[in-house]
Image (cartoon, rainbow, N blue to C red):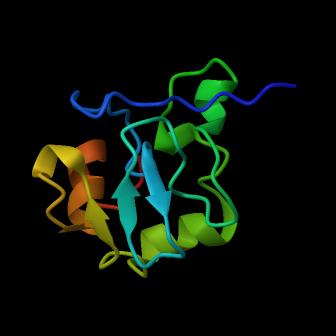
Amino acid sequence: MSIKVSVPDPNEMPTRRRCPFYGFNNYHWSGLLDNAGNQCGATTSGLYGCFMELAGMIPDWDVCGVNSGELAEMVRSGELDDVPVFPKEKNHRGVSLREWFIERMGREPTQNP
């Protein structure tokens, strides 16, 4: 089995999906750093490409298998609201995960899809 992780062009704006974690490195919830690729920032145990994309699906946090259990509860409860996110399109200026979630998903993290 081959693993595909996209390598971004540093001069292009990243393609975003309907997922606040798509295209970010996660440093144990101390911050999500833009990698402008397809990395899954919802995982802290390693560097992985988006599992949905690797399975040939369009990434969407609401139907993602990673959005379950303890992580899903941490997002819904607001426990991760203040984690800083550094997206390239905001000139790597930090925004809160809550703010980024609303921008990507069009709703509050506490709201059901």
Q: Please tell me which residue is depicted at 48% across the width and 57% down the height of the picture.
A: 25
Eyeballing the image, is 15 above or below 69?
above
- Residue at the (59%, 27%) spot, across then down: 53
> Can residue 106 be seen?
no
Question: Which of these two is toward me, 28 or 112?
Answer: 28
User: For the point 56% across and 64% down, which residue is it?
Assistant: 72
Q: Is residue 100 above or below residue 50?
A: below
The spot of residue 40 in percent (x, y) is: 54, 48
Residue 10 sits in quarter? top left
Instruction: Give the residue displayed 36% in from the left and 39% down from the top.
Output: 36
**Quarter containing the N terminus:** top right
Q: Is residue 34 left or right of residue 96?
A: right
- Taking the image as drawn, is residue 59 in sight? yes
Work out which residue is located at the far right of the displayed protein and give it: 1
x then y, percent, for residue 51: 65, 37
The percent position of residue 41, horizontal first and vertical second, equals: 50, 55
